[in-house]
Image: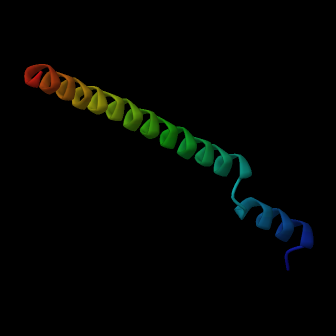
Amino acid sequence: MPCKARIAARDREWSPPRIAWRSLLLADWLLFGLVYICFLAQLERWSATVRDRIFVNLLVVA
């Protein structure tokens, strides 16, 4: 019959490491930040294109 120390050691062995979960959480936040920055960059490019087209149309009409 196994002793309590071996059972406790085996139970500790199966618990997920906390550092790995924190690393995955940090990686998820970094990935989310990168996607958000790319979205903002594309939005800025799109708004600049729309703004330029509006001013060109105003110049042509005037």
Residue 5 in the figure: left or right of residue 60? right
Establish if 8 lies above or below 55. Answer: below
Please tell me which residue is depicted at 14% across the width and 19% down the height of the picture. Answer: 59
Residue 25 placed where, x, y %?
A: 61, 48
Quadrant of the frame with the C terminus: top left
Looking at the picture, how far across and down is residue 3, in whole percent? 90, 73
Q: Taking 37 as reference, is 2 left or right?
A: right
Q: Residue at x 38, y 38 (%)?
A: 39
Q: Is residue 33 above or below residue 21?
A: above
Q: Of residues 27 and 58, which is closer to you in this image?
A: 58
Q: Is residue 39 above or below residue 6?
A: above
Q: Between residues 4 and 26, which one lies in front from this camera angle?
A: 26
Judge by depth and name the residue closer to the eye, 11 or 62.
Answer: 62
Image coordinates for residue 24, horizontal then vertical, percent: 59, 47
Q: Residue at x 23, y 27 (%)?
A: 49
Q: Quadrant of the N terminus?
A: bottom right
Residue 50 placement: quadrant: top left
- Which one is in front, 55 or 50? 55
Q: Measured from the top left, where is residue 56 in percent x and y?
A: 15, 22
